[in-house]
Image (tube, grey):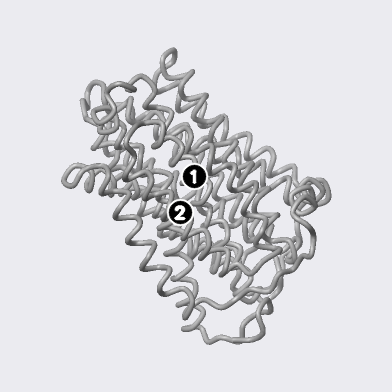
Amino acid sequence: MSTPGSRPAASDRSLRGLLLLLATIAGVSVANIYYNQPLLDDFRQSFAQSASWIGVVPSMTQLGYAAGMLLLAPLGDRFDRRRLILLQIAGLCIALLCAAAAPNLSVLVVASLAIGVLATIAQQAVPFSAELAPPSQRGHAVGTVMSGLLLGILLARTAAGFVGQYLGWRAVFGSSILALILLAAVIPSKLPRSKPTSTLGYGSLIGSMWHLAVELRGLREASLTGAALFAAFSLFWSTLALLLAGAPFHYGPQAAGLFGIVGAGGAMAAPIAGKFADRRGPRTIVSLSIVLAAIAFVVFAVSGTSLIGLVIGVIVLDVGVQAAQISNQSRIYALKPEARSRVNTVFMVCYFIGGAAGSAVGALVWPVFGWLGVSIAGLGFTMLAGFNHLRGRPEPHKAAGAAN
């Protein structure tokens, strides 16, 4: 390894090992914000006296994650990322322990908020990968770590449902603590330190994100495109269970959760998308990704009664949305290398705002217009992404090895 903060003089095998470790960190940490979703009925049974506000649990977790991205993720530019990851793991284990031992719903809600805040470890791992990799491999590096993050998102519900069914909901949080402890034992000897790139105080560090958004047109463009695509993605996933519960499927929530495994196949395309972004330029890959997402919603529109059609659409949508995210992140990390954590925070906050908007639109459209309305709304978000992307300033193609 070279000096911390500079590009490491590591072999391909060494870099690959570091990226796989970061991918594991990202996936294991982000999964914690989704574990509670399939456990809501179990919470209701355990805290029957507070059953009317069980839904606050996942809401507080998501709110905590948004707050953590805004308040903690930028610290990666100011402090050693390895140390931040270890500190957040320690805090997350404490929050998970509180959740596992929660005597009432109030404690569980507070613990869920803390879990959301501290699970933003993934937002240290992704920019860390961009720092470790040379410019010619940045897209592939980000794609590798993002594949771990996406697998954590897609498989968390399935894992929680399985463990919760056989061992109880408290064991889900306990299992996560065990996984995090194992990671913490490996990180000090395997992950290098990073060199801080900013000396700003905390208030100035947070405030500087607004200035970055104003200064960097490419960041604004990538953020809006990503937000629109994630809105389409969230709209689909927030209404899928409702479709599957009705005729002709009549499937329960477990079947909807199994679609996460189908989507996981799409997550494996993330490193490939990163490689293509390195070779062809990220804007080209984003263009192709938007087309794939649009095709997916056309498939959904004609597959309201076809399980095979839904499966095909899920794979196409996941590949499209994930490839766009990898390419957009590869692009923005090159805009301001000394502010990667803050640039990533701006992008991801916009991304999750888009996701929340998509879920809200799904809740409004489904009761009135049904699955066809959902598909048209998803196509609308995709077209918004396409319009914003096409009106952006084209970038000259650069050969491999040059920063995108």
Outermost residue toward the left in this view: 166
| Percent position of residue 154, x then y | 38, 48
Image: 163 above or below 373? below
Numbered disc 1: secondary structure: helix
- Residue in the image at 62% along x and 39% along y: 385
| Percent position of residue 188, x then y | 49, 76
Residue 271 visible to an observer of this rendering: yes
Q: Residue 190 carries which label?
A: none
- Residue in the image at 72% along x and 50% along y: 219
Camera-side residue of 83 and 10: 83
The residue that mark 2 highlights is 92
Q: In which quarter of the image is the C terminus?
A: bottom right
Residue 298 visible to an observer of this rendering: no
Camera-side residue of 309 and 57: 57
Outermost residue toward the front in this view: 103
Image: 53 above or below 174? above
User: Which image quadrant is residue 342 in?
Assistant: bottom right
The residue that mark 1 highlights is 114
Three-letter amino acid code of the residue under disc 1:
Ala
Give the CA distance from mark 1 to mark 2: 8 Å
- Residue in the image at 54% along x and 32% along y: 356
Q: Residues within 10 Å of mark 2 (few under 14, many from 20)?
A: many
Q: Residues within 10 Å of mark 1 (few under 14, many from 20)?
A: many
Q: Determine whether label 1 and label 2 are within 8 Å by CB.
A: no
Three-letter amino acid code of the residue under disc 2:
Leu
Image: 394 above or below 299? below
Mark 1 or mark 2: name the one nearer the start of the chain: 2
- Horizontal side of residue 342 vs 297, given as left or right: right
Camera-side residue of 207 and 170: 170
| Percent position of residue 47, x then y | 29, 28
